[in-house]
Image (cartoon, grey):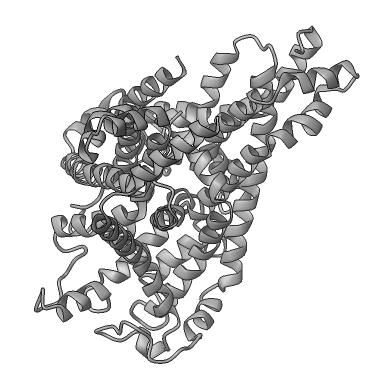
């Protein structure tokens, strides 16, 4: 179709606006960010070329490592919760009975609301004096005094935030796992039943291996999302105490905007982008395979 | 034929008839899970209709002792007023949908149907935003927008949201256009229709589900997006809903946090997303599957 010269030109014309848009609003900023990362620039003074100094500075910057380690810790704790929890929910709700479908829909609702808004909601629930979580725990006799959940102790803040984000995004993995489980051919399921396999045998020998690729892809998507965490920490702890809960993106944000260290912020961005790229490449390789 | 169907059905029934008690337990588990998922939302909605004093009470009450729309009234007039923020959020979301469709529908059509030299390279280039997270590009974006006067404008924020949304949209639409039977289009071309007509009359109608999916994702992403808005919108009058609520978390007329008003704002921000999702669930889920996994 459209194999004429005119046809080819028409095709290029259809493609041009999108290409132009990506060129101006993604590729150009990327180029500028790389350029900025080699400069010392604070908006007030003109940019000055300083070579790799911003990168060297990052490696000696204690807060950079604190943020990076904290982000990794957050990711390491939340990922298994989201993947194992999401998979168990998928196993529970992959049948198409009415109650299962309703559960599926309900678990997915928080996925469509904003992370910022859900963080504000949980900021209230975890609030020391006004939150329902302390109130409920006290009424149940689990705690005597209200607990300071957010912004005082880094680990406790992390746990509270992990609980809130798990509530918010666990349905994402679940829905994709359900899709993969339902895509298993009926013949295979029937064969297992005929062979008299128990439920757990079916899960571990058949369902899990056949949906492994989806599990890996969702894990990577989820890890990338967690490494880029910002909204929940900005809103729920504002990085407190002493920037101990400032994630990598948060630290990039702090440097670029409030501190106006544009060059240094760009170098940090680039380090972050390269870290993410490693995960993205694996993800793309995994998704590629499905087309073959 | 009938026998096979009957056999298959009996097996399915056998598969479902797990021991009864286990069935009840799993049913109860489903109900418990639904409760846990809905409770935070329900509590927020309930807190939003508490009278002012009760909403600010410490320790808090579980259920409102009286109903009142005071919190919504305070939100209505908070700073620039709720209508401004709603209009900003809605305007940005609608512009994002428009920009995304205008850019990706023709591009996806070209990628699906036209013999363009180096097409695969162009496609990968268009997916650039998938490879570089937008969180890392915000400083140069801000500088670019500041230079051309797009900071603090809905168009500027919508451009950022479109840049975020473009790869997924292109991907979903290209797959959908590729699946349209070529015979229909070829017949139309033989009848002398231009490629533009073919796109408008045949491809777009056949790909409506994908277009709805793309619009839906663009809306939800734009309505909810926080960090980009935080960076690009510094003037109070151009804040979107998530921004003004995050600001209201700390600074309000009551001195401390106005918890009732905050819950009213949360409720209002959540409603459109949940409504749109419940109405268009099918599109959302298929879009998620084709975008994230395949």
Image coordinates of residue A41 in percent, x first then y, are 38, 37
Image coordinates of residue A252 in percent, x first then y, are 32, 42
Q: Is residue B180 visible from the viewing direction of this image?
A: yes
Residue at 42 percent across and 26 percent down: it is A35
The quadrant of the picture occupied by the N terminus of chain B is top right
A12 lies left or right of A70:
right
Residue A76 found in image quarter = top left
Residue A258, placed above or below residue B70: above
Q: Residue B44 versus residue A53: which sits nearer the camera?
A: B44
Residue B65, placed above or below residue A121: below
A63 lies left or right of A283:
left
Q: Residue B207 versus residue B243: which sits nearer the camera?
A: B207
Image coordinates of residue A139 in percent, x first then y, are 17, 81
Residue at 15 percent across and 56 percent down: it is A154
Image coordinates of residue A142 in percent, x first then y, are 10, 73
Residue at 44 percent across and 67 percent down: it is B245
Residue at 25 percent across and 59 percent down: it is B25
Residue B180 found in image quarter = top right
Q: Is residue A41 visible from the viewing direction of this image?
A: no
Q: How many marks?
A: 0
Q: Residue B29 versus residue A115: which sits nearer the camera?
A: B29
Residue farthest front in this picture: B3
A167 lies left or right of A102:
left
């Amino acid at each position: 179709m459209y194999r004429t010269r005119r046809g080819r030109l028409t095709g290029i014309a259809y493609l041009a606006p999108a290409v132009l848009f990506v060129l101006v609003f993604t590729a150009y900023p990327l180029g500028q960010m790389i350029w900025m990362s080699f400069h010392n620039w604070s908006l007030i003074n003109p940019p000055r070329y300083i070579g790799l100094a911003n990168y060297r500075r990052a490696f000696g910057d204690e807060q950079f490592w604190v943020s990076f380690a904290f982000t990794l810790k957050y990711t390491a704790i939340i990922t298994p919760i989201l993947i194992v929890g999401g998979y168990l929910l998928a196993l529970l709700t992959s049948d198409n009975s009415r109650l299962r479908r309703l559960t599926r829909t309900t678990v997915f609702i928080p996925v469509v609301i904003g992370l910022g808004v859900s963080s504000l909601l949980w900021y209230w629930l975890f609030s020391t004096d006004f939150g329902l979580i302390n109130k409920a725990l006290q009424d149940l006799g689990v705690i005597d005094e209200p607990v300071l959940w957010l912004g005082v102790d880094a680990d406790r803040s992390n746990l509270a935030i992990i609980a809130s984000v798990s509530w918010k995004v666990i349905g994402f993995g679940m829905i994709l796992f359900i899709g993969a489980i339902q895509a298993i051919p009926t013949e295979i399921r029937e064969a297992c039943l005929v062979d008299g396999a128990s439920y757990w045998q079916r899960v571990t020998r058949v369902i899990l291996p056949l949906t492994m690729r989806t599990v890996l892809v969702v894990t990577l998507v989820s890890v990338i999302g967690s490494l880029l965490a910002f909204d929940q920490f900005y809103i729920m702890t504002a990085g407190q105490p002493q920037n101990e809960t400032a994630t990598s993106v948060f630290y990039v944000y702090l440097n670029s905007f409030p501190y106006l260290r544009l060059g240094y912020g760009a170098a940090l961005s680039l380090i972050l982008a390269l870290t993410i790229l490693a995960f993205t490449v694996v993800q793309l390789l995994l998704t590629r395979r499905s087309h073959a | 034929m009938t026998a096979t169907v009957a056999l298959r059905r009996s097996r399915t029934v056998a598969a479902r008839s797990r021991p009864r008690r286990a069935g009840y337990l799993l049913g109860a588990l489903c109900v418990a899970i639904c409760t846990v998922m809905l409770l935070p939302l329900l509590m927020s909605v309930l807190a939003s209709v508490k009278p002012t004093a009760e909403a600010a009470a410490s320790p808090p009450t579980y259920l409102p002792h009286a109903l009142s729309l005071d919190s919504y009234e305070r939100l209505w007039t908070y700073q620039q007023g709720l209508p401004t923020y709603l209009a900003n959020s809605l305007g940005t979301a609608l512009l994002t949908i428009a920009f995304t469709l205008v850019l990706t529908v023709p591009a996806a059509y070209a990628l699906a149907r036209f013999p363009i030299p180096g097409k695969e390279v162009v496609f990968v280039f268009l997916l650039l935003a998938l490879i570089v997270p937008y969180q890392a590009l915000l400083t140069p974006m801000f500088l670019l927008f500041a230079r051309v006067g797009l900071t603090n404008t809905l168009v500027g924020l919508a451009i950022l949201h479109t840049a975020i949304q473009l790869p997924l949209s292109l991907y979903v639409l290209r797959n959908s256009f590729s699946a349209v039977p070529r015979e229909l289009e070829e017949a139309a071309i033989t009848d002398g229709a231009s490629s533009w007509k073919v796109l408008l009359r045949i491809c777009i109608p056949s790909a409506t589900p994908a277009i709805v999916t793309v619009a839906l994702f663009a809306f939800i992403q734009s309505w909810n997006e926080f960090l980009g808005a935080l960076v690009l919108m510094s003037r109070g009058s151009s804040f979107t809903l998530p921004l003004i609520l995050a600001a209201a978390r700390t600074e309000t007329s009551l001195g401390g946090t106005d918890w009732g008003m905050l819950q009213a704002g949360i409720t209002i921000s959540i409603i459109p997303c949940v409504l749109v999702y419940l109405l268009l669930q099918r599109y959302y889920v298929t879009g998620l599957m084709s975008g994230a996994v395949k």
